[in-house]
Amino acid sequence: MAYSETKVVIGGLAHIPIIIGFFYLIRRQYSFGAMLRTGKNALSNKVTAPAKKSSPAPAKAFPAPAKASPAPAKASPAPPKVAASKKPHADVPVNTYKPKAPFTGTVTENYSALKEGAIGKVQHITFDLSGGDPEFKYVEGQSCGILAAGEDAKGKPHRPRLYSIASTRYGDNFEGNTLSLCVRQLQYEKDGETINGVCSTYLCNLSPGDKVKISGPVGKEMLLPDEEDSNIIMLATGTGIAPMRAYLRRMFEPTEIEKHQWNFKGKAWLFMGAPKTANLLYDDDFEHYKSKFPDNLRYTKAISREQKNIKGGRMYIQDRVLEHAEEIFNMIENPKTHIYLCGLKGMEPGIDEAMTTAAAAKGLDWSELRPKLRKAGRWHAETY
Ligand code: FAD
Ligand code: A2P
């Protein structure tokens, strides 16, 4: 009798770890959703601790987080601002100059952003914005409208085309009076004829001194968070790099840092998609930033016509996202992480598919998470 009672007690005790494990899994699932809703990491150490053990890669990629980027929760005692503030960026200028009454800027520079052997034509173009009344001011992540000279087939002025601003608010010369763009000339074949895009061709062929009608700035979708210890994941294809160039200059260009006193302390991770190595835009600058700030910047390239994905097809950024799925999701679990997507419209389904697979590996449903991230102001997408 005494023997069987002992057996019952031991049997009961043996179930305790199973029950604890069961409750842990339920709480974990609930907490991730709650974290996205509230912007607070309800998981606190519990999720990050096992993630570190099972995935040593992030530690390698950002090798000295203790000094360069202190544990986010400790570094900033009032973090909920990232997601909780109702009207973030309320003071960011929008539509200072409308398409009907545009600002006239002057081209100061127009040079190729490509290296020898690249496909197509991509130009880095800078405009002087001095003398505006009101002044033409913008911040990183905004776009502007360009009104090409001439008229359309109906004899009307060309409608404005939007371009992401590739410079920081201080401009490439750090004087706060210029704006730069990164423009690919649109060219396609139709009925055996080469068709040139109206506005992109106009922009790519401009010379210093030319006057250009510019509207804007527009957009608040792609703005950076204010917090210095935010983590920024960037997914870009082609000229989608334009806003990312502005972010990276703001974070890592020494004169920028001196100017604005905004000392980025988080992790930035750029995924860049280009057809060939020679098409990697601003690659030398980014490599330089990476060498100067190895703890804060990671740079992953998908070179579609030179590299192959695991299926033997062209290497796209979504393939790179899949390769690093666990690290990306570990970062997303931190409410200070923002994701920015910019470039070809066609990349969105591919990124979604990759995120769906990556989320599923963690027992999460991307179709539920994505809108929550968006609502929390942490998912920023601008594709065209
Ligand atoms: P258009 O003369 O307007 O010709 C475009 C039209 O050509 C298309 O609407 C389509 O009808 C047709 N067409 C295009 N390709 C083909 C094809 N293969 N076959 C048949 N028909 C075709 N562009 C950049 O280079 N850099 C940027 O930073 C940038 N940022 C942008 C930001 C935003 C928010 C948006 C919305 C767009 C951005 N663009 C950017 C794209 C830019 O606005 C223009 O759409 C692009 O430059 C083409 O304009 P275009 O006047 O040269 O072409
Ligand atoms: P590819 O053209 O080899 O198919 P660019 O604007 O300089 O051409 O760069 C765009 C990059 O995005 C290219 O490497 C292009 O590859 C790649 N790309 C094309 N379609 C997609 C897609 N659906 N998803 C992700 N990347 C894409």
Image: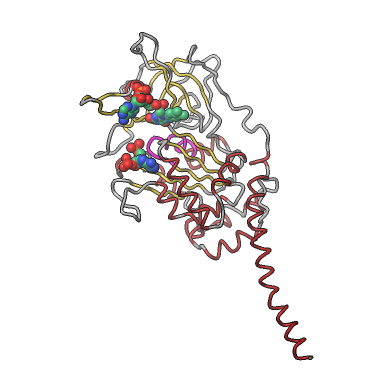
Type of secondary structure dominating the magenta stretch: helix
Q: Is residue 41 visible?
A: yes
Given residues 110 and 200, the one toward you in this image is 200
Pinpoint residue 71: horizontal percent, then vertical percent. 62, 55
Please identify the residue farthest to the left as the structure is shown.
192
Residue 239 magenta-drawn? Answer: yes
Q: Is residue 181 visible?
A: no
> In the image, 77: left or right of 162?
right
Q: Looking at the figure, which quarter contains the C terminus?
A: top left
The residue segment tinted magenta is 236-247
Q: Where is residue 110, by image quadrant?
A: top left
Residue 349 magenta-drawn? Answer: no
Pinpoint residue 195: horizontal percent, then vertical percent. 27, 24
- Judged from the image, the quadrant occupied by ligand 1 is top left
Given residues 3 and 43, the one toward you in this image is 3
> In the image, 32: left or right of 182?
right
Q: Looking at the figure, which quarter contains the N terminus?
A: bottom right
Relative to 182, say whether 26 is above or below: below
Please identify the residue farthest to the top as the structure is shown.
155
> In the image, 120: left or right of 372?
left
Relative to 56, say whether 255 is above or below: above
Q: Residue at x 45, y 34 (%)?
A: 383
Please identify the residue farthest to the right as the structure is shown.
2
Q: Residue at x 56, y 48 (%)?
A: 266
Pinpoint residue 149: horizontal percent, then vertical percent. 36, 14
Pinpoint residue 229: horizontal percent, then vertical percent. 59, 46
